[in-house]
Amino acid sequence: MENFLLIILIIAFIFAYYTFSKKISYLEDEISELRKNANKSIQLTEIKEEKTTSEVKFTLDKDIQEVQPIEQQISISEEIPPQKDWVAPIFDFLKQNILTIIGIFTLVLGIGYFVKYAIDKNWIGETSRAGIGFLIGGGIMLTAHFLRKNYAIFSSIITGGGIAILYFTTTIAFREYHLFTQNFAFIITCIITLISILLSYYYKSETLIIFSLFGGFLAPLMISTGQSNYPFLFTYIMVLNIGMLIIAFLKQWKSVGWIAFIFTNIYLFYWTLEKPEILSIYFYIIAYIIFYAFALQSYIKKNLLSTYDILMLVLINFSSIIGIVYIFNELEYEPVIIFPIIFALINGLLLLKEYNKKAFGVSYSVFTGITVSLVTIAFALQFKTHLITTVWAIEATLLLFIWKKTNLTIFKLCFYVLFPLVIITQMVTWAEYYTAKNLNIVFNPVFLTSSVTVITTLANLILLKKLPETQKQDNSFFEYTFKILSFGVIYVALLLEIIYHISGKPWSFIFSIGLLFSVYYLFIILLFRRKLDINKDFETGLIYIFLFLLMLNVSFSASGIVTSILVKKIDINFYAVHLLYWIPFIYTLWKILPESDFFKKEIAYWFASITFVTVISCELYHLYILANTTDILTVWKLEKHFSILYLPIIWAILSSIFIYLGLKKNISELNKVGFALLGLMILKLYAYDVWQMDNVSRIIAFIILGIILLLSSFMFQRLKNIIKNLVDKKDDNIENDNPELQ
């Protein structure tokens, strides 16, 4: 009964397929007829409109040439050719062929389950199983061959499925059934790869060559026994790459080169990390030549570099440098700069060619950037900088430079991906400060690596500054984030080097030097804020941080210094070094703050005033302590005396200054600050200080304070009268100039 139903289902399927095929043939004939009619109509329309179109085109070309800048006209031949959108075709391919892909995958699974079922039932032996696999794979490829004329893409996918079956059959026959030796299995996989490459060339199918390359590069893994035979493996891979290069030159299929590049580098880096040896350098050189030639194929034929050609040039140069230099370092070979210099010379020859042609376009910029980057890497590595951090830092700057020259988004994206990696590797490099001993000042591997990162980061800031305004607006968030990270990297790099070399000093000394450096670092940024193209909001934020660090410096750091001086841990002359913060502080108050947008918000006056009061009060207190004692045990008495007697006088004077400046410059917030400080001083005096004084001190404090308050009141009244007289005089002048008002 079951067999009868199965026969009926097969007959019904054949009948349905036959009917469906007839309908498809009928529809294809109808579509073909419609296309013929449409082509005739289009030809007639084109003949009628040809004259009009040519006239309009001539007029537009003439207008464009008049408007277009001369430099842009000259560089038209140097523009990067229009690039294919790689994402859209992939999605279109998947939408149109998803059923075919799922179908062939399902078929392979079905055959696999059938074979497994047959094995479980002991229907077929091991040799028969392998034979069935080869027959099915060959049968599928033969079926695809007959379908290639009318169903090209469908045929390519079916052929790929057949190739996959052949690969997996060979793998299972070798690894599970041990029907072949490893060498014979490898020969079979090579034959399968060769057949698939020849078929893809014959069918002119890029889809099939992709299947073939995946199979070719995965074949060594399929027949691997776990023993490392790298020379044999990479001989095979390089032969495969040469075949790829020939196909790429003949058919202009860029995808095959990128697939080969990714697989080759994975294998090479794995070998390099597992077993660094001099032999692998030869394979790095062969790979460099192959993929360098692949990247230059459009340049050789058309004297143009496409987007992905430029990216390949950058990646092949820097990936080869990383691998070869790593091997040199591990094996302690010298000179380590030989290959960066050789690669720089190769790119320099192409640069010279562009220079001799006086072609200063995209190709010239790319070869210039790569050559300079490689020379920079060579010098950096000669000074024993860390390899990955140095190479990535310079490569990130090169990508930013190429983005600026070409305005191609892919290089911007690569830069924004690579720069965070530079920061991460730099942080790993900085961690060596905690374990390294007896590092030289400046000329040590950690700081030299940091120096490369600092220099490239400064170069990045300059390149970003020179971007057109439209690009700056489009990338404002990334630019803002990048600037913050860049300033942070430079700051940490310099600070850690300083702290490492003074780490043997008392903590108060280290803390003071660190804060002093931070103050000067922010001051330099604010000083060159225009050249660094810092926006107003960022500038205001830096000023707030600068003022906060000043308060931290005079309150905590200076107190620690005074204590260390009194206990003889630090020489008293160091206090003069601490006072160097006054230079940026005074200049900032006098020049930077008035020119900035800092005082646009009222709270800024309060923050700046609090900073000024804190700095003056704390500094006078510290000088008072140092001038009157050398014994740490008497500090608390002097501190109490200063707080009760001198601090109210200092605050009274400062409050008078704030009130005076507020009236003179007509700044109400300064008046409020002055009166608030005066109120705080009076509250402190009457609530606490009076009860702590002896009679003589109380009399002196009240007399001096009274005189200060009277003088302040007198100045306040006098300034009010001056302002009133100026206003009255101005009103009189207005009335004299306008008789009608009288």
Image (cartoon, helix red, strand yellow):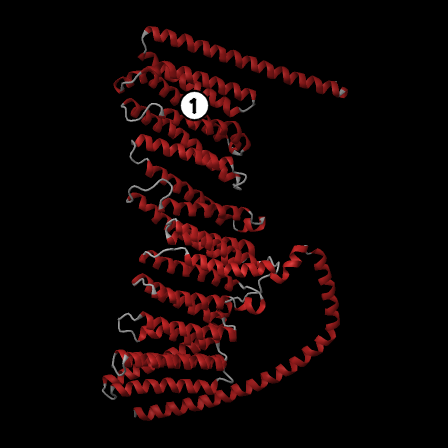
At x 37%, y 73%, the residue is: 235
Task: List x then y, in percent, for residue 719.
Answer: 56, 15
**Snapshot quadrant of residue 501:** top left
Q: Nearer the viewer, residue 76 or 600?
A: 76
Label 1 CA crowd tier, 10 Å (few <14, some 14–19, many 20+): some
**Snapshot quadrant of residue 519:** top left
At x 55%, y 64%, the residue is: 305
At x 41%, y 32%, the residue is: 548
Query: Is any part of residue 191 visible from this angle?
Result: yes
- Residue 669, placed above or below residue 124: above
Q: Nearer the viewer, residue 388 or 556?
A: 388
Task: List x then y, in percent, for residue 400.
Answer: 50, 53
Residue type, mark 1 in image: Val
- Residue 528, placed above or below residue 654: below
- Residue 63, placed above or below residue 192: above
Q: Is residue 587 left or right of residue 275?
A: right
Q: Is residue 312 left or right of residue 117?
A: right
User: Could you say whether the residue bearing mark 1 is in a helix, strand or loop?
Assistant: helix
Query: Is any part of residue 741 visible from this angle?
Result: no
Quarter of the picture holding the N terminus:
bottom left
**As drawn, which residue projects farthest toward the right?**
739
Task: List x then y, in percent, for residue 413.
Answer: 48, 56
Q: Nearer the viewer, residue 157 or 225?
A: 225
